[in-house]
Image: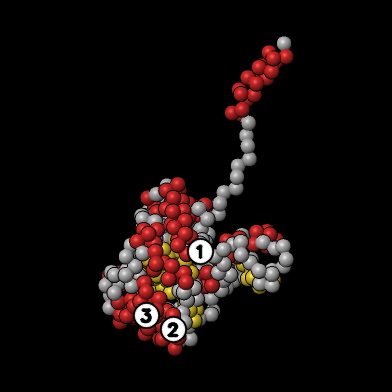
């Protein structure tokens, strides 16, 4: 009798199981799209994308070391696999590492699972070579970004998608003079400069010494991307109200940004669908709140501190250029983004 009752109860539970609802896990925050930083400080972040060959990497590292400049290198897994010693040299010189995918695909054509695979494979390889993480910064191959990419990348643990406001297009084989002119004529406080380490950009190592000396003469200091993010000023993002006859292309051109950047900042997936009266955020003007300082105490962890200040571990790590979130020391003063 008892066994029969038990069988009936089990059958009922099986029938009712599909009707039971369970709490959903919180969605990961979308990656923040950054083209430059709004700051009054004369700072600039030199960034280099490392592809399959990385032919000029050591030349670039020597120039940066000679001028006491720290930069940020966005690494591909294929490049790290092809020239691991170059990647080790980048980390050994104290430069920041970012993720640039494994095979350099167009992320707007990938699923979230495929994005995560590209990022995880690169992260694992770079960590095995350098002992350092590429998190929390990512740069999209070809600069191809939309809202789906920002969501997928954010879910994979990359809180910041780093674009640029100065594209040297050095990969087209420009001369040193042409590359430097692009930088000097477009520089502003908080700029992010895009360059490459490959053989297709032979003018870059030739341009760097003059570029650095001229920027220093203008009062600029060189910082990593995470250091740059920590210097963002409090301000309200610029917005634009769509008017009759406007297109994303015309608005992007008017504000000196790319269509993909404008679409990503406003989570627009169809570039042809905007409407009169719609308010658009202009990328490159959005900033994070002001910061406070916190001195690490015995028993503290980044997670504990982040919870106390209602922020995230990724944000604190980025603001303090921390590559290993488990390594903080008592007495260490942290900048807390609010």
- The quadrant of the rendering that contains the C terminus is bottom right
**Mark-to-mark CA distance, 2 and 1:** 24 Å
Question: Callout 2 environment at 10 Å: few (<14), some (14 to 19), or many (20+)?
Answer: few
Where is residue 319 drawn, in percent x and y?
58, 68
- In the image, what residue occupies the spot 59% across and 28% down? 18
Residue 327 visible from this viewpoint = yes
- List the residue tagged with mark 1: 132
Q: Residues within 10 Å of mark 1 (few under 14, many from 20)?
A: some
Report the front residue among 267 and 322.
322
Tell me the CA gap for discs 2 and 3: 10 Å
Q: Position of residue 331 (x, y in %)?
A: 69, 72
Residue found 72% across the figure and 14% down from its top: 2
**First in sequence: mark 2 vs mark 1:** 2
Disc 2, SS: loop
120, above or below 218, in the image: above
Q: Are marks 2 and 3 in contact (CB under 8 Å)?
A: yes
Say the numbered circle drawn on residue 67.
2
Locate the N terminus by quadrant: top right
Secondary structure under the numbered disc 3 in the rendered image: helix
Residue 64 sits in quarter: bottom left
Name the residue beneath numbered marker 3: 208
**Of circles 2 and 3, which is in front?**
2
Residue at (66% x, 72% y) in the render = 332
Q: Residue furthest top?
A: 1
């Amino acid at each position: 009798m008892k066994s029969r009752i038990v069988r009936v109860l089990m059958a009922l539970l099986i029938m009712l199981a599909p009707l039971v609802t369970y709490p959903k896990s919180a969605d990961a925050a979308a990656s923040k799209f950054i083209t430059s930083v709004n700051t009054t400080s004369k700072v600039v972040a030199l960034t280099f994308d490392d592809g399959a060959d990385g032919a000029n990497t050591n030349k670039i590292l020597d120039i940066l070391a000679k001028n006491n400049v720290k930069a940020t290198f966005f690494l591909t897994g294929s490049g790290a696999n092809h020239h691991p010693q170059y990647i080790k040299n980048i980390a050994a010189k104290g430069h920041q590492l970012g993720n640039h995918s494994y095979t350099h695909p167009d992320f707007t054509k990938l699923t979230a699972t495929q994005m995560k695979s590209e990022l995880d494979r690169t992260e694992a390889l770079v960590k095995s070579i350098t002992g350092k993480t590429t998190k929390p910064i990512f740069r999209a191959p070809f600069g191809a970004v939309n809202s789906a990419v920002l969501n997928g990348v954010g879910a994979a643990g990359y809180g910041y998608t780093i674009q640029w406001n100065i594209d040297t297009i050095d990969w087209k084989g420009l001369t040193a003079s042409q590359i430097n002119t692009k930088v000097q004529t477009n520089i502003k406080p908080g700029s992010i400069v895009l360059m490459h380490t490959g053989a297709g950009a032979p003018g870059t190592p030739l341009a760097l010494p003059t570029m650095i000396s001229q920027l220093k003469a203008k009062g600029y200091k060189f910082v990593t991307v995470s250091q740059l993010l920590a210097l963002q000023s409090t301000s309200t993002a610029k917005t634009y109200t769509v008017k009759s006859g406007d297109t994303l292309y015309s608005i992007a051109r008017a504000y000196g940004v790319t269509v993909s950047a404008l679409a990503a900042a406003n989570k627009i997936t169809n570039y042809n669908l905007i409407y009169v009266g719609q308010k658009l955020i202009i990328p490159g003007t959005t900033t994070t709140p002001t910061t406070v300082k916190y001195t690490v105490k015995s028993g503290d962890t980044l997670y504990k501190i982040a919870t106390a200040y209602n922020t995230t571990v990724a944000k604190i790590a980025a603001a303090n250029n921390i590559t290993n979130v488990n390594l903080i020391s008592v007495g260490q003063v942290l900048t807390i983004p609010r």
